[in-house]
Amino acid sequence: MSVKGILFDLDGTLWDSSEQVVAAWNLCIEEKTDRPERFTVEDMHRFMGKTLDVIAAMMFPSLPAEEQMRIIRMCFGYEEDHIKANRPYFYEGEREVLESLAKKYKLAVVSNCQVGYIELYMGHCGFPELFCDFESAGNTGLSKGQNIRLVMERQGIDDCIYLGDTAGDEEAAREAGVKFIHAAYGYGTPAAPDASIASITELEQAADKLFGE
């Protein structure tokens, strides 16, 4: 019998932490560096979903790569503390949708984030038991597509959908050889998703259709 799973991107898909992250990063840059850069929520939306080295290069293009990474790692320390104390925005209807999906499919989170970030989501969401697994680029050093496959193998999933909001998420799904649903309420515009939803409340119907339920 086929084991079906839905894997989720995090930012712009399961929550929007951009306000919290921007506040933390700007405070870190002000307190810990002499850099003039300050960032906006719109900037953060452009960064979301990319790997840490790419984000660092976008933030501080004039600096050497080592210095870019040194600063962004400091920012992550501030980010973790700030998000622990300030709950990000969760999408309306999210819990109810995931509770229903978890009765039929295995659910997991796969993100390009640093170690500890998915754990922040699990700590705030109130329903971590609905997810059977999660993985991050910060933990494995692998691409998002490779991490999707890794979670599928760990959980015995042989028919999978990845839900994400960016072109990078679509590319990861294609790399992993799985179906892709675009979370159009997020930050990006993929080229050719298998389905698109305007709200997370539309996910179950879209997933059932792709799975042939």
Image (tube, grey):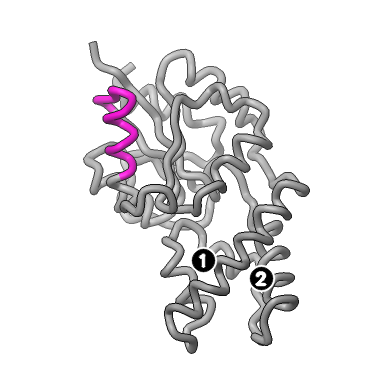
- Which badge, 2 or 1, is on the more N-terminal residue? 2
Q: What amino acid does circle 2 point to?
A: Thr
In the rendered image, the vertical position of residue 75 relative to residue 97, given as above or below: below
Which residue does the image show at 53% across and 76% down from the upper left? 59
Name the mark on residue 46. 1
Residue 151 part of the magenta segment: yes
Could you say which is closer to the camera, residue 98 or residue 66? 66
Residue 92: x and y in percent read 66, 35
In the rendered image, the vertical position of residue 175 relative to residue 155, given as above or below: below
Could you say which is closer to the camera, residue 154 or residue 97? 154
Residue 41: x and y in percent read 65, 65
Residue 70 part of the magenta segment: no
Badge 2 element:
loop
Badge 1 element:
helix
| Rendering quarter of residue 210 | top left
Residue 1: x and y in percent read 23, 10
Which residue does the image show at 44% across and 85% down from the upper left? 64
Could you say which is closer to the camera, residue 22 or residue 191? 22
- Give the magenta part as a residue range: 147-159
Which residue does the image show at 73% across and 78% down from the upper left? 30
Classified by dominant secondary structure, the portion drawn in magenta counts as helix
Which residue does the image show at 43% across and 61% down from the upper left? 50
Name the mark on residue 40. 2
Q: What amino acid does circle 1 point to?
A: Arg
